Image (spheres, rainbow, N blue to C red):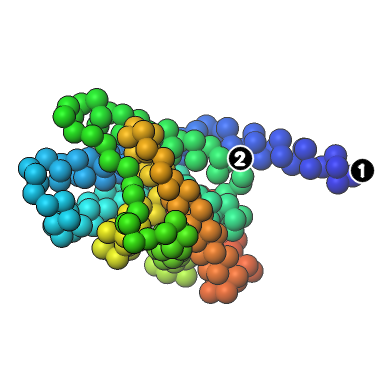
């Protein structure tokens, strides 16, 4: 009886903490950072199509452009939101933080809503303002299966989210700028490694927003299942193997964690 009465109370308390003015500012920060990240990533893809002017689309310069844009856009997006929301800019990062207990479930759901809405809005703006160009959704290569692509996306997300946890380790000297750059570099490396195969999204929000506007949901599960599992494993490994739970209280809320 006691536990049954306490559970709803605890849930209500967590929900109230998720709608405070500080929490609302965090959601706004996530929306702004995710919007500009997706706008840059998807916009660069459209710009690349424009510059190609009918050339072969498999040109390696496309891959390099995508990687460089991810480095710059993600590092900047993470940095500008790091001290407010933690700079997740990615539902997978938020999920990893929630699994590790650094973010409550209600807060994580609000983060997801802000990130997804920002991604959709960014893609809509690109679609409406750039006439003659279509927003492309992420796709896997013909030689890849859905399972194989999910594994690749999961491994890459593990690397990215583990980097997020590592740069937020309080045993390191606090330097959000360097941490954000490291996260951006890992994202760029992921694109170079898997862009031609699984798409190298590693961000469910980015994949979802472009799919909504493009009207194509083929293999969309690849960009959710793999990344969420990879993010959860990254959080568990970091908090329980590399950085044991007894030190986890050094994370004092999402505002001090650098994310993607």
Count every numbered label the image shows and give the total: 2
**From what the image shows, is residue 230 above or below residue 260?**
below
Query: Percent x, y for residue 48?
Result: 15, 46
- At 32% from the left and 34% from the top, the residue drawn is 214
Along the viewing direction, whichever of 97 and 13 lies nearer the viewer: 97
At a point 61% along the width and 45% down the height, the residue shown is: 105
Q: Which mark is residue 1?
A: 1
Instruction: State the separation of the CA atoms marked 2 and 1.
Output: 24 Å
Quadrant housing the N terminus = top right
Q: Position of residue 121 (x, y in %)?
A: 35, 30
The front one of 1 and 56 is 56
> Given contact means CB atoms under 8 Å apart, are the residues at marks 2 and 1 in contact?
no
Q: Which mark is residue 48?
A: none
Residue sticking out furthest to the bottom = 241
Q: Label 2 belongs to which residue?
A: 106
Q: Sort mark 2 into few (<14), some (14-19) or many (20+) by Cα contacts within 10 Å.
A: some
**Furthest residue in direction right, as rendered:** 1
Residue 192 sits in quarter: bottom left
Residue 148 visible (yes or no):
yes
């Amino acid at each position: 009886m006691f536990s049954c009465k306490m559970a709803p109370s605890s849930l209500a308390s967590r929900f109230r903490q998720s709608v405070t003015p500080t929490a609302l500012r965090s959601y706004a920060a996530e929306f702004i950072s995710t919007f500009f990240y997706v706008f840059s990533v998807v916009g660069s893809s459209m710009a690349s199509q424009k510059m190609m002017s009918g050339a072969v689309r498999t040109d390696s310069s496309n891959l390099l452009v995508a990687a460089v844009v991810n480095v710059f856009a993600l590092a900047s997006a993470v940095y500008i939101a790091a001290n407010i929301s933690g700079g997740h800019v990615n539902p997978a990062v938020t999920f990893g933080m929630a699994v590790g207990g650094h973010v409550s479930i209600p807060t994580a759901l609000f983060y997801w809503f802000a990130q997804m809405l920002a991604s959709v809005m960014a893609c809509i703006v690109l679609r409406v303002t750039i006439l003659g160009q279509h927003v492309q959704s992420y796709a896997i290569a013909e030689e890849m299966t859905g399972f194989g692509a999910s594994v690749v996306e999961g491994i890459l997300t593990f690397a990215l989210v583990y980097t997020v946890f590592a740069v937020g380790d309080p045993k390191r000297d606090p330097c959000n700028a360097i941490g954000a750059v490291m996260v951006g570099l890992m994202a760029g490396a992921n694109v170079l490694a898997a862009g031609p195969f699984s798409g190298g999204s590693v961000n469910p929000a980015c994949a979802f927003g472009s799919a909504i506007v493009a009207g194509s949901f083929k293999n969309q599960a690849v960009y959710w299942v793999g990344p969420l599992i990879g993010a959860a494993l990254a959080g568990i490994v970091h908090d329980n193997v590399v950085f044991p739970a007894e030190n986890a209280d050094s994370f004092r809320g999402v505002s001090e964690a650098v994310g993607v």
